[in-house]
Image (cartoon, rainbow, N blue to C red):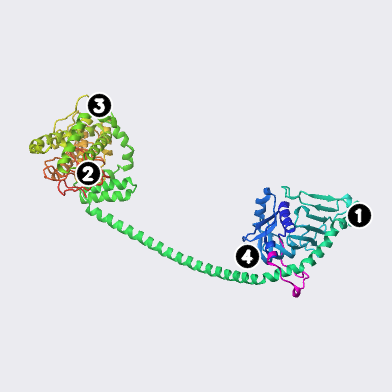
């Protein structure tokens, strides 16, 4: 705390830092002469050893320059000071008060006096409000042109009881800062060999130690004589200096009066404008708040209306979606965690299509097969194998296993595209590369039983297109020599062989997975073991109809699941039935479901295609089939459900060309 006090008091006494208007300077204003412009300009200049200290309002006052190590603390102290007066060109001007405060906001002192662009002139009075012996005392300082004398005035009636009363102090403040001196008389002068007088001659240039240059003097028996010797000349010079320059001070005040009137008027106008601006800002803030409230209300209303529309659309979709769409929607809602709406969709599927195979699957899911439990067992189900055949995973490097088949498929696709559409060869080759990668990823997700179903489907496609190719021999003349569906099926069979890890192609007879074989209900390998039954069960549980799947894709997936259940019943796996009669009833029910699904699927096919039980993944079960080859000039873009491959511009999302599609072909779930 003593550092703060030293900075404050030193600023007040050393550099005219804290004074204000004082009355009775002894000048006869009727005989005041004008002051020259040169003298006014000279007093405004900053001299060596002086420093501009900025108050809280940004108004500058001239004081002594501190040591560089103390400048930051010095500026922080002054930033708490307040100048209550005119501020012109960033400098304190005219009468006013300089109020100094501590970090806590407590007032330390109040200086009243007159300033000439930040420089004190005339008589200034500093009232000390710092707690202690000197509380309430006043110090008079008379300044002119950067030089001054100071003396304290002891109050006769102290505001608070104190052990010792304050004693006199004087100061001499010449322009040459190396000659400045301060003297104070101690209250305990002469008692018990205590020092009587404090002499302070602050070094210049300033040093880091704020108390440097201070000396305590002993009176050696006569305190009065020592005080008169040291302080007497300064006391006498104070009055002489004040009388000598009283007329100069009065001339400056008179010369600045018109400017002060103008500055005060501007300050009043600025204050009035500030009040008007504040009022306008308040009005604008209220207006913006009202607008924001209206916008918030409108947004809340929009969200409510949007929620109502979404609910209406949801209710409408329950009455307009086909079975595949309803099943996929329920699966999507369940994956999103909205089990309540998922069950609503499942109930709509069962009520609108009670005889559809997907209705039975939905009922089974609602009865206890939750999406979470099914998802938890998905990995185990995919890795399980009823026959233990699917044990070799594929990778992108597996492309090297079927190079010849890939080359035939690529060339066939390029030639077919050139005949039907004419896309650039590099575009088609990019499509083929993506198809092969997607097929490898899809095959890695299948169990051994699912691979068998895919194998049958590819073989059926191969046999079908071998026949169709003979009928389309006339196209050979225009370069359509190889069917991409045929080569795609051969490529799929090659990859399945690699996935199964066998040394020879596994090509079942065509029609081995048909309605007749499903009707027989016999498992190819006789009675199944417990692990095989569990693996097949997990396959059924984890198989899902992909979102946005076509009618063909969703129905063939249901056929695969139903066929798997029939094989489990034929293999003696545990089912819902217990007695032989119950097991037989369940087998008949599943057989009827399979037959109904197969018939419904075949009814929407074209080009001689027949539905087969197979699993459609998200990458293959797109809802946009190709135009059948029998449509001359038709588009060759799109997905082929026979091979699970996609070719044409529509298979590359970033391709900037436009693709024309035909409305013919397989009906899709929209």
Q: In which quarter of the image is residue 369?
A: top left
- Please tell me whether residue 369 is drawn above or below residue 351 in the rendered image: above
Mark 4 touches mark 1? (CB < 8 Å): no
Q: Which of marks 3 and 2 is in front?
A: 2
- Report the Cα–Cα distance between label 2 and label 4: 77 Å
- Please tell me whether residue 261 is drawn above or below residue 108 in the rendered image: below
Query: Which secondary structure type mostly characterizes the magenta part of the structure?
Result: loop
Instruction: Tell me if residue 36 is in the magenta stretch.
Output: yes
> 193 or 349, which is in the foreground?
193
Instruction: Tell me if residue 91 is in the magenta stretch.
Output: no
Q: In which quarter of the image is residue 394?
A: top left
> 563 or 213, which is in the foreground?
213
Point out the tag, 3 or 1, that comes first from the N-terminus: 1
Q: Which of marks 4 and 3 is in front?
A: 4
> 190 or 49, which is in the foreground?
49
Point out the tag, 4 or 1, that comes first from the N-terminus: 4
Q: In this view, does 595 lie to the left or right of 52?
A: left
Q: What is the crowding at mark 1: few (fewer than 14 residues within 10 Å), some, or many (at least 20)?
A: few
- Report the Cα–Cα distance between label 3 and label 1: 121 Å
- Report the Cα–Cα distance between label 4 and label 3: 95 Å
Q: In which quarter of the image is residue 456?
A: top left
Instruction: From the image, tell me which residue sits under label 2.
Output: 649
Magenta span: 18-38
Q: What is the crowding at mark 4: few (fewer than 14 residues within 10 Å), some, or many (at least 20)?
A: some
Instruction: From the image, tell me which residue sits under label 4.
Output: 88
Asked if residue 360 shows in the view, the reply is no
Instruction: From the image, tell me which residue sits under label 1.
Output: 222
Q: Percent position (x, y) of residue 511?
A: 13, 34
- Please tell me whether residue 365 is drawn above or below residue 263 in the rendered image: above
């Amino acid at each position: 705390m003593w550092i703060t006090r030293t900075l404050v008091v030193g600023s007040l006494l050393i550099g005219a830092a804290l004074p204000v208007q004082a009355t009775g300077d002894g000048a006869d204003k009727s005989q005041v002469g004008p002051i020259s412009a040169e003298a006014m300009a000279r007093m405004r200049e900053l001299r060596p050893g002086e420093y501009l200290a900025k108050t809280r309002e940004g108004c500058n006052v001239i004081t002594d320059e501190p040591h560089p190590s103390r400048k930051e603390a010095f500026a922080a102290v002054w930033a708490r000071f307040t100048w209550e007066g005119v501020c012109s060109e960033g400098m304190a001007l005219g009468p006013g008060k300089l109020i100094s405060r501590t970090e806590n906001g407590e007032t330390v002192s109040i200086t009243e006096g007159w300033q000439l662009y930040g420089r004190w002139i005339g008589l200034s009075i500093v009232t000390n409000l710092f707690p202690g012996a000197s509380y309430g005392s006043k110090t008079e300082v008379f300044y002119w042109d950067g030089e001054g004398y100071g003396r304290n005035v002891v109050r006769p009636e102290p505001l608070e009881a104190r052990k010792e009363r304050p004693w006199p102090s004087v100061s001499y403040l010449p322009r040459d800062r190396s000659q400045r001196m301060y003297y104070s008389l101690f209250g305990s002068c002469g008692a018990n060999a205590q020092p009587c007088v404090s002499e302070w001659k602050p070094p210049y240039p300033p040093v880091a130690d704020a108390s440097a240059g201070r000396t305590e003097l002993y009176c050696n028996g006569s305190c009065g004589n020592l005080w008169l010797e040291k302080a007497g000349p300064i006391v006498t010079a104070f009055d002489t200096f004040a009388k000598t320059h009283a007329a100069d001070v009065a001339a400056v005040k008179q010369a600045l009066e018109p400017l002060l009137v103008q500055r005060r008027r501007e300050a009043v106008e600025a204050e009035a404008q500030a009040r008007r601006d504040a009022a306008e800002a308040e009005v604008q803030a209220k207006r913006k708040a009202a607008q924001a409230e209206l916008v918030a209300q409108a947004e809340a209303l929009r969200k409510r209306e949007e929620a109502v529309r979404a609910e209406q659309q949801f209710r409408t979709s329950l009455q307009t979606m086909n079975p595949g769409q309803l099943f996929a929607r329920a699966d999507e809602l369940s994956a999103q965690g909205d089990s309540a709406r998922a069950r609503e969709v499942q109930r709509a599927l069962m009520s609108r299509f009670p005889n559809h195979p997907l209705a039975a699957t939905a009922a089974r899911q609602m009865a206890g097969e939750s999406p979470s439990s099914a998802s938890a067992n998905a990995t185990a189900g995919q890795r399980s194998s009823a026959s233990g055949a699917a044990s070799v995973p594929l990778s992108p490097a597996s492309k090297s296993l079927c190079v010849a088949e890939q080359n035939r498929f690529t060339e066939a696709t390029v030639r077919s595209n050139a005949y039907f559409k004419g896309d650039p060869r590099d575009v088609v080759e990019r499509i083929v590369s993506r198809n092969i990668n997607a097929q490898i990823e899809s095959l890695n997700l299948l169990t051994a039983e699912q691979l068998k179903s895919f194998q049958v489907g590819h073989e059926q496609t191969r046999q079908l297109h071998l026949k169709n190719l003979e009928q389309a021999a006339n196209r050979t003349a225009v370069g359509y020599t190889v069917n991409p569906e045929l080569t795609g099926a051969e490529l799929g069979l090659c990859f399945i062989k690699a996935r199964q890890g066998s040394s020879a192609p596994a090509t079942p007879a065509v029609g081995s997975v048909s309605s007749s074989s499903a009707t027989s209900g016999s498992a190819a390998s006789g009675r199944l073991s417990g692990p095989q039954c569990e693996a097949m069960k997990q396959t059924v549980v984890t198989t899902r109809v992909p979102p946005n799947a076509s009618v063909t894709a969703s129905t063939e997936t249901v056929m695969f699941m139903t066929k798997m259940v029939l094989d489990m019943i034929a293999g003696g796996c545990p089912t819902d039935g217990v007695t032989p009669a119950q097991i037989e009833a369940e087998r008949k029910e599943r057989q009827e479901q399979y037959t109904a699904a197969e018939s419904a699927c075949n009814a929407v096919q074209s080009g001689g295609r027949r539905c087969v039980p197979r699993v459609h993944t998200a990458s293959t079960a797109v809802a946009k089939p190709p135009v059948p080859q029998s449509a001359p000039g038709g588009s060759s873009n799109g997905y082929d459900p026979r091979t699970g491959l996609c070719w044409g511009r529509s298979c590359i999302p970033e391709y900037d060309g436009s693709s024309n599609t035909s409305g013919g072909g397989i009906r899709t779930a929209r």
